[in-house]
Structures are given as structure tokens and as C-alpha cells.
Image: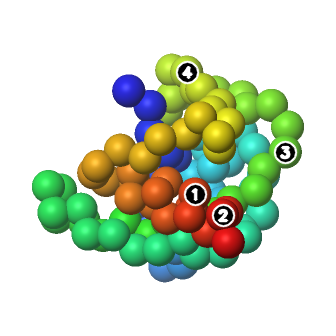
Amino acid sequence: MFGLVTGFLERGETPEDAVLREVEEELGLKGELIGLIGHYSFFEMNQLILAFHVRVEGEPRLGGELAEYRRVSPEKLRPWPFGTGYAVRDWLEMRRR
């Protein structure tokens, strides 16, 4: 199963800085923050998910955190009913407007 790039805040880091850092660490790509998608309770892990729309260019270079990746076109993307799947649902809805 594949999901979205995720991570945790480091001490003194803003959510916006954290998401750009995680994209670079996990995919080797510089990102441009487009905006907040939303916030989601992740009760199973006692966490709060903050989901951002990030635009990147280039080919991913996998580091030590991911074994593989898969690109899925928005037309074929289907949200899943937990965790970051809710952010996918809302992002797809935002694209339709």
C-alpha cells in the first residue's frame, strides 16, 4: 500500500517548513508550498494530520526512508477511508472547483 509523504515536526519547526523538509528528505525534491488542504484527526495514533498541497518538479531520488514510490494521476487516484486518505479526498474536491 502506498500513501502520502508524511513526517513529524522537529523542535522549533513550523508545519510549513516541516512539509518541505520531509519532501526533500524522502524524495530528494525541492517543493513549493501551494496551500493547506486541511487538518485531520488520526485517532488510531493519537495524532493530528496537517495536509499541504506541495508542487515539485523533477525526478524523485529515494533516500533511506522510502523503498519505492508510485506516481498516480489525479484521474486514477482514489481516497482511502483513514489517515491521509481524507486529505486526498479533499484535495481532489478542491481540484474540481
Residue 80 location, quadrant: top left
Q: What's the image's color scheme?
A: rainbow
Count all numbered tags in the image, as a single digit: 4
Q: Is residue 11 visible?
A: no
Q: Secondary structure at mark 2?
A: helix
Question: At x 65% / y 44%, what residue is drawn?
Answer: 74
- Please name the amino acid that badge 4 sits on: Glu
Between label 3 and label 2, give the one nearer the viewer: 2
Is residue 74 visible in the rendered structure shown here?
yes
Kind of residue at badge 3: Glu
Q: Are marks 1 and 2 in contact (CB under 8 Å)?
A: yes
Q: Position of residue 54 (x, y in %)?
A: 69, 60
Residue behind mark 2: 96
What residue is shown with label 4?
68
Real-space Cα separation, disc 3 to disc 4, in angstroms: 18 Å
Residue that label 1 marks: 92
Give the mark toward the camera: 1 or 4: 1
Cα distance between the residues tagged 3 and 1: 20 Å
